Image (cartoon, coloured by chain):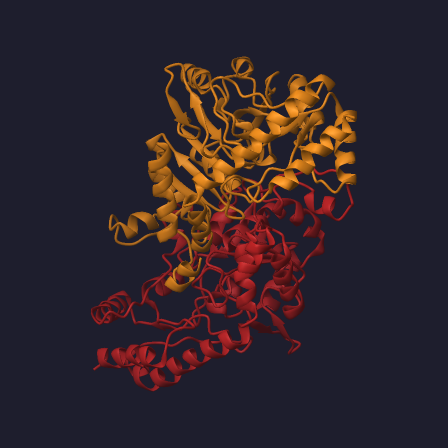
Chain colours: A orange, B red
Amino acid sequence: MQEAADSGKISGNGMFTKKCQNWFEKSYGFGKCLLTTSCTDALEMAAILLDIQPGDEVILPSYTFVSTANAFALRGAKLIFADSRKDHPGMDESSIEALISSKTKAIVPVHYAGVACDMDLIMDIANKYGLFVVEDAAQAIDSFYIGRDKKKRALGSMGHLAAFSFHETKNIISGEGGMLVINDMQFAHRAEIIWEKGTNRSSFFRGEVDKYGWVDIGSSFLPSEIISAFLWSQLENIQDIQVRRKSIWNKYYSTLIPIIGEYGIKMPFIPKHATNNAHMFYLLAKDKNQRDEIIDFLKSLEIHVVFHYLSLHKSPYYADKYDGNDLPNTDFYSQSLIRLPLYYELDEESQERVINSIITFFG
Amino acid sequence: MQEAADSGKISGNGMFTKKCQNWFEKSYGFGKCLLTTSCTDALEMAAILLDIQPGDEVILPSYTFVSTANAFALRGAKLIFADSRKDHPGMDESSIEALISSKTKAIVPVHYAGVACDMDLIMDIANKYGLFVVEDAAQAIDSFYIGRDKKKRALGSMGHLAAFSFHETKNIISGEGGMLVINDMQFAHRAEIIWEKGTNRSSFFRGEVDKYGWVDIGSSFLPSEIISAFLWSQLENIQDIQVRRKSIWNKYYSTLIPIIGEYGIKMPFIPKHATNNAHMFYLLAKDKNQRDEIIDFLKSLEIHVVFHYLSLHKSPYYADKYDGNDLPNTDFYSQSLIRLPLYYELDEESQERVINSIITFFG
């Protein structure tokens, strides 16, 4: 950050932005990468790029952060919510096809907890119906999908577009921050324009045009170089960060599984087609009562655990606009999921305190 | 920034964000202030708050940065472009009333170069027709309007809403960054929701609701605490920054005015109702040819001066949507304005080189 400030160039699209973008493109087989001020903003860019118009339908899970939905709602889309899987909070891929209508424009799978949706299935459906796929990979950095061909592909490299988050709650952080990945190159040129406030400034600096002006809608999606410099220092340490997070995750799993399984508590499930990037460790209580009791008990010991998300199809904003089916799995996760503390700085002693407190709760 | 990083809280709406917001509210008599990732984003928040719908009309100058227009275009507004004043690039206040129709929703005056538009006139018109006023105060930090009552009021404190920029080209900077000011308190509660991704998270943290969820459209408009910390360090030095900028501005003015006036070159004009925040020093060439000759000559001496803006009503994006009158003053500034280097770090020797080079050009 000092280097960025000293350079005198701290507005967007400078050296650190380019270093980060190049690193992502090379490390994960992504198409064109553009850093943004948030994952929300990357999703908004995706909605603009897909030219979402009022009345267009977008299929997405109900069990997700509001930004997945908001980005498309801002363009006037009708949101078609899919249920979660029985075995995992991610969207039930088998339910997608029945939700498609003549107005469907895109499918937005969310790789919940960094665990891959079944992308072969989703891309097959998208290709069959001529739909676009935007991967919401907010939590999915450094995580992979293992396809039918047994090949490992990075999450965010398979959809036409993908969005990542570097919010401070993520594995790789810059406070607030995000990234749009453009894998379908038909969107690359326009993405640059939308990113630069609807101007052809990028073409201007490459010498392709002799002045730049207003050529399209757009916004200021670029992060400051200070943010990109912070992110770069994280990328330089990604191996170390991931080793530590996986160690914390594995310790939760191995110590808790023999004890709490018998009380009806479920542990995270990783499908065979997915790797684990140790973004999140969660427990699934039997029901809301048990979930609240566990949270209250831990809170009394000053251990801060959280639940999320409220089902979007039942939210104050969307409930009266939603005309679809019940989504029982979404509601279940909404009422029973508990996130345990998982961050790089969590030391062994603190983690053991969390584990022992949970064991104490179950007597 | 170190303090922010050490605190472990680098996502938005933390201590530094609040410190900056409080400082602005107290220092300039602003209503509620919310930092944003850019002035563009603050303008987008304004457009959402005013509930701009497709077909609504918004009156704004054509001689402005694209973001003034884009923020409203994104919500489907029809843009009604006003001409610049004969004596100043700011919008001609006397032309506004004729542009009002039954569909007009808002007037967006831009305080070009930090020089106030005549806000008494504009607010009178707005009140007469029941319109909202959004001050685009991107360049206008620490600048004032002197009203009919002889009182000095800070730019950004008079419109229903106002937007500031802290882009690195501005007086007070954070790389990329901005702020929305809410002076009409009917918008305060919803502004907080839109800022926080359409959720009532702020109410939740104040204990007003027991959980937070999706209640409205919105985006992630909050800057990282790292950005807010950078901005805070700028605010701590605002006096020093402004003294230096005004000294540079005055030196340009006093040394150039006796020499180049006779060659038909005009200098910045500050109306009696405005103060000068030394955001920008510009020359007005007689025409495009002379402007280009001056720029080329200075470029040959490795002095970087720039022109702007291309008239928005003639832009590739909007030309075929524009059905209004010719805007001759806008076109004049578009073809004749030259910005001279003006930044805090510009030392005396470098400034003298710029001045002497301009004098040399005129023989």
Q: Total marks drawn?
A: 0
Residue positioned 58% across, 23% down in the render: A80
The reply to whether residue B272 is visible in this rendering is: yes
**Image spot of residue B20 (x, y percent):** 61, 62
When asked about the image quadrant of residue A264, the answer is top right
- Residue nearer the viewer, B104 or B226: B226
Task: Please say if A271 is above or below B98.
Answer: above
Left or right of A240, for residue A301:
right
- Residue nearer the viewer, B113 or B173: B173
**Image spot of residue B310 (x, y percent):** 36, 57
**Image spot of residue B332 (x, y percent):** 35, 64
When asked about the image quadrant of residue B34, the answer is bottom right
The reply to whether residue B96 is visible in this rendering is: no
Residue positioned 39% across, 29% down in the render: A157
Task: Please say if A251 is above or below B216.
Answer: above
Farthest bottom residue in view: B258
- Residue nearer the viewer, A352 or B297: A352
**Image spot of residue A297 (x, y percent):** 78, 34
Task: Please say if B26 is above or below B79.
Answer: below
Residue positioned 68% across, 51% down in the render: B187
Name the quarter where the C terminus of chain B is drawn.
Answer: bottom left
When asked about the image quadrant of residue B97, the answer is bottom right
